[in-house]
Image (cartoon, rainbow, N blue to C red):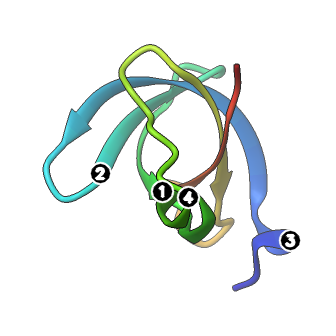
Amino acid sequence: MAKDDLAQLEGKITDVSAGGLYRVMLENNVEIVARLCGKMRRFNIRVVVGDKVTVGVSPYDPTNGLILYRHK
């Protein structure tokens, strides 16, 4: 599935787990597990607890996401 097909939602990082997994609390109070997208890993974009992020969520599995952007 391409990044264009993902629903983009805003959220906040609540927990960082081993293996590059992040728990993200979305604006609608749903917590999902997300990982960094390829460009963020490539350019070493750091994401820490408390950061606001944009998460791409698949319509087929809304419990997993892909962190697309870290807001400043």
Q: Return the residue nearer the eye: 1 or 62.
A: 1
Crowding around mark 1 (Cα neighbors within 10 Å: few <14, some 14 to 19, many 20+) is many
In the image, residue 50 above or below residue 3: above
Mark 4 against mark 1, which lies toward the viewer? Answer: 4
Q: CA distance from mark 3 to mark 4?
A: 21 Å
Q: Earlier in the sequence, mark 1 or mark 3?
A: 3
Q: Secondary structure at mark 3?
A: helix
Can you identify the residue that label 2 sits on? 21
Can you identify the residue that label 3 sits on? 4
Q: Is residue 2 left or right of residue 57?
A: right
In the image, residue 45 above or below residue 15: below
Q: Secondary structure at mark 4?
A: loop
Three-letter residue code for mark 1: Leu
Q: CA distance from mark 4 to mark 1?
A: 11 Å
Which residue does the image show at 75% across and 64% down from the upper left? Answer: 6
Q: For residue 28, what is the image quadrant?
A: top right
Q: Is residue 60 left or right of residue 35?
A: right
Q: Earlier in the sequence, mark 3 or mark 2?
A: 3
Marker disc for residue 43: 4
Q: Return the residue nearer the eye: 36 or 6.
A: 36
